[in-house]
Image: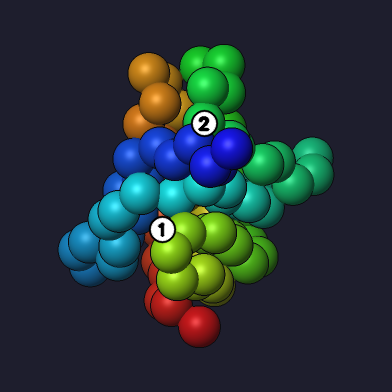
Amino acid sequence: MAAKSFEVTVVSKEGPLWKGQAFQVEVPAIGGGMTFLAGHASALVILSKGEMKVKAEKDLAFSIEGGFASFDRNRLVVAVDSGRED
């Protein structure tokens, strides 16, 4: 059975960082990390400084400086104060 994917958009104040389909996204949330998978319940999470990992056709990692993540209807939007792909 193939893993299900969901739409992900990562943006910073400077502009878009990445957009695509992912199978899993791990974010550094306030109070501990959080992992999103397809079908996740709606959530709004405040992010802390740390590493965000995206498992997609090509795995990615981003160093981020806080912000928020919003998951709804199989779409994840991650808006960071500052970030860069590692």
Q: Quadrant of residue 72?
A: top left
Q: Position of residue 67 (x, y in %)?
A: 47, 48
**Depth check, front residue: 63 or 2:** 2
Most extreme residue toward the front, as rendered? Answer: 1
Numbered disc in front, either 1 or 2: 2
What is the residue that sits farthest to the bottom in this orientation? 86
Q: Secondary structure at mark 1?
A: loop
What residue is shown with label 1? 81
Residue 24 lies left or right of residue 8; in this view the side is: right
Q: Is residue 83 left or right of residue 66?
A: left
Residue 73: give its label: none
Q: Is residue 47 left or right of residue 35?
A: left
Task: Confirm whether residue 2 shows in the render.
Answer: yes
Pointer 1 with pointer 2, Cβ within 8 A = no
Dot 1 or dot 2, earlier in sequence: 2
Identify the amino acid type marked 2: Ala
**Circle 1 crowding by C-alpha within 10 Å: few under 14, some 14–19, many from 20:** some
- Judge the density around disc 2: few (<14), some (14-19), many (≥20) Cα neighbours within 10 Å: some
Disc 1/disc 2 C-alpha distance (Å): 25 Å
Residue 33 locus on image (x, y percent)? 74, 47
The spot of residue 31 in percent (x, y) is: 79, 40
Instruction: Give the labeled residue for mark 2.
Output: 38
Is residue 70 something that shows in the picture? no
Query: What amino acid is labelled 1 in the image?
Result: Asp
Residue at the image point whose x is 49% and y is 36% from the top? 4
If the image is split into quadrants, where does the N terminus sit?
Answer: top right
Q: Is residue 18 above or below residue 67?
A: below
What residue lies at 45% left-to-right and 71% top-to-bottom? 58
Q: What residue is shown at x 37% (from left), y 18% (from top)?
A: 73
Q: Position of residue 28 (x, y in %)?
A: 67, 52
- Residue nearer the viewer, 14 or 17: 17
Q: Secondary structure at mark 2?
A: loop
